[in-house]
Amino acid sequence: MSKHLKTYIGGQVKTLRRQSGLTQAELGEKIGRTAEAISNIETGKSLPSLDTLIAVAEALSVPLTDFFPSGSVDLDRSANRLKLEAEAMAVLRGLSDKPLTVALAQIKALGEL
């Protein structure tokens, strides 16, 4: 598995965990893993098994698909860029329609700079 995809998945886990108001230790406890294991996933040091990722999705009440990019992963992008994109996608998915419309307008305006 590509390091980039591990970084993306880890970024999604971190962002979605934070949005749920959980610490690494609390998430780990919910799924039977240690805080260190959660940290290793979030930093892209380790790739969670499918069973672990399913447990994380259930613990955070999000669809499993939220951990994966909607398209292909651009291998020319830096790991930091992929983390930022993962965080942005998680935030956007959590917005209701009206704030999402505002956010999209702001993103488009930034893209025109």
Image (cartoon, helix red, strand yellow):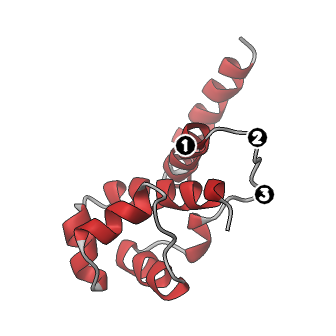
What whole-number distance in Å separates the C-alpha atoms at marks 2 and 1?
19 Å
Q: Where is residue 55 in the image (x, y as percent from the top left)?
A: 42, 84
What whole-number distance in Å separates the C-alpha atoms at marks 3 and 2?
14 Å
Mark 3 neighbour density, 10 Å: few (under 14) some (14–19) many (20 or more):
few
Residue 55 shown left or right of residue 32 in the figure: right
* Residue assigned mark 1: 88
Determine the secondary structure under disc 1: helix
For the residues labelled 3 and 2, say whether their Cβ atoms are less than 8 Å apart: no
Q: What residue type is labelled 3?
A: Gly
Q: Considering the image in quadrants, where does the C terminus appear?
A: top right
Q: Earlier in the sequence, mark 2 or mark 1?
A: 2
Q: Considering the image in quadrants, where does the N terminus appear?
A: bottom right
- Compared to residue 59, the image places residue 87 above or below, namely above
* Residue assigned mark 2: 76
Q: What residue type is labelled 1?
A: Ala
Q: Which residue is drawn at 56% across and 49% down?
A: 86
Determine the secondary structure under disc 3: loop
Mark 2 neighbour density, 10 Å: few (under 14) some (14–19) many (20 or more):
few
Residue 57 shown left or right of residue 86 in the figure: left
> Looking at this rendering, what residue extends furthest in the top direction?
113
